[in-house]
């Protein structure tokens, strides 16, 4: 009995670490995508397509080298899961970058990621027909307050119509990511996290490809641009989504969604350290509250 409990605890800790890793790596993706867009003059949809396609290609290549493509299951359940994951990843990226175009990176990111735990908590409450736990409600409330402080006012938004449109797209992106969290939590026979990541990213990239080609996907042959696009596909995409799907196996969906809050927190801290951005007192308070929400959630998980 004690061995079983110890094994379950080890798996839970490993899952939590995987989710934390995914959140931090996603945070580097925002900065990398922004730098790539500026360096190569790419439309956000093109950046998103490169991210999904290269992330999927890198993961498939790794699978091939590790022998993971042998005896690949070809069941309807596997095909359905990969199509669902790809469609949700494509929708999430498209809605998010539409929100960026209508508002700003900070407003779109904070609204999108901040809404995910709320959507997941509501979905869990409806599915299980019970109120969310007090610790869950506390974590979500603290996280939303932290995000509000970290975001600040939406300066630079031209008018209210564009702001509301951008917020609607950001909320749609948050709902898409929440649905991805809920839909991919249950394992499918023969489909591990690495396979889900590889072919889910490829499917999402292919779905975005027509829009990205319309927007323009040409890359200048410069070392800095190639390094940025390579990093974007490999680290905050292939590695991060593999860690996320792995962590989903042993963590509750709300905990997984709250872990995604590390993305805007990491991105903001990187912007402060590398780009000279200033948070101010309210921003730093928001960052502390975000970290606090994760601590409450992981304490509850333990």
Image (cartoon, helix red, strand yellow):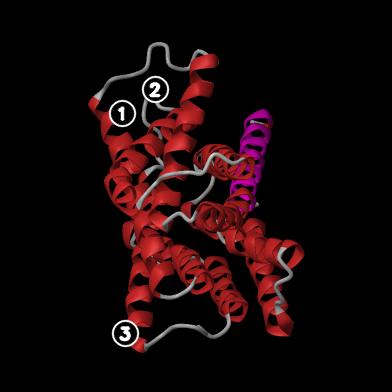
Question: What number is the disc on residue 161?
Answer: 3
- Which of marks 1 and 2 precedes in the sequence? 1
In the image: residue 108, left or right of residue 205? right
The kind of secondary structure element at disc 1 is helix
Q: Residue at x 32, y 76 (%)?
A: 165
Instruction: Say whether residue 173 is visible.
Output: yes
Q: Residue at x 58, y 83 (%)?
A: 152
- Which of marks 2 and 3 precedes in the sequence? 3
Q: Is residue 29 above or below residue 102?
A: above
Task: State which mark lies toward you, 1 or 3.
Answer: 3
C-beta proximity under 8 Å, tags 2 and 1 = yes
User: Is residue 12 found inside the magenta-colored segment of the image?
Assistant: yes
Q: Is residue 57 above or below residue 98?
A: above
In the image: residue 177, left or right of residue 229? left
The x, y position of residue 167, in whole percent, is: 38, 75
The kind of secondary structure element at disc 2 is loop
Q: CA distance from mark 2 to mark 1?
A: 8 Å
Q: Is residue 47 above or below residue 142?
A: above
Question: What number is the disc on residue 78?
Answer: 1
Secondary structure predominantly adopted by residues drawn in magenta: helix
The magenta region covers 3-24
> In what quadrant of the picture does the N terminus appear?
top right
Which residue in the protein does label 2 denote? 190
The x, y position of residue 208, in whole percent, is: 32, 47
- Which of marks 3 and 1 precedes in the sequence? 1
């Amino acid at each position: 009995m004690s061995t079983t409990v110890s094994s379950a605890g080890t798996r839970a800790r490993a899952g939590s670490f995987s989710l934390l890793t995914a959140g931090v790596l996603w945070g580097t993706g925002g900065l990398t995508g922004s730098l790539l867009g500026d360096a190569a003059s790419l439309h956000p949809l093109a950046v998103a397509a490169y991210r999904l396609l290269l992330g999927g290609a890198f993961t498939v290549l790794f699978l091939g080298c590790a022998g993971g493509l042998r005896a690949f299951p070809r069941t309807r359940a596997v095909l359905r899961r990969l199509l669902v994951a790809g469609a949700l990843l494509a929708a999430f990226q498209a809605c998010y970058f539409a929100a960026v175009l209508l508002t700003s990176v900070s407003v779109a990111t904070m609204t999108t990621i901040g809404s995910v735990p709320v959507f997941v908590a509501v979905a869990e409450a409806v599915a299980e027909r019970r109120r969310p736990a007090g610790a869950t409600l506390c974590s979500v409330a603290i996280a939303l307050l932290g995000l509000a402080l970290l975001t600040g006012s939406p300066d630079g938004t031209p008018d209210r119509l564009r702001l509301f449109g951008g917020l609607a797209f950001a909320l749609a992106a948050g709902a898409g990511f929440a649905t991805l969290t809920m839909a991919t939590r249950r394992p499918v026979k023969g489909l591990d996290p690495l396979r889900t990541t590889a072919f889910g990213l490829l499917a999402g990239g292919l779905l975005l490809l027509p829009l990205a080609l319309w927007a323009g996907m040409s890359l200048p042959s410069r070392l800095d641009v190639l390094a940025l696009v390579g990093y974007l596909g490999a680290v905050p995409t292939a590695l991060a989504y593999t860690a996320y799907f792995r962590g989903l196996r042993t963590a509750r969906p709300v905990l997984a969604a709250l872990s995604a809050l590390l993305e805007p927190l990491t991105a903001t801290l990187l912007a402060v350290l590398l780009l000279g951005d200033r948070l101010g007192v309210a921003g730093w308070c928001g960052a502390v509250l975000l970290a606090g929400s994760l601590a409450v959630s992981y304490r509850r998980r333990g």
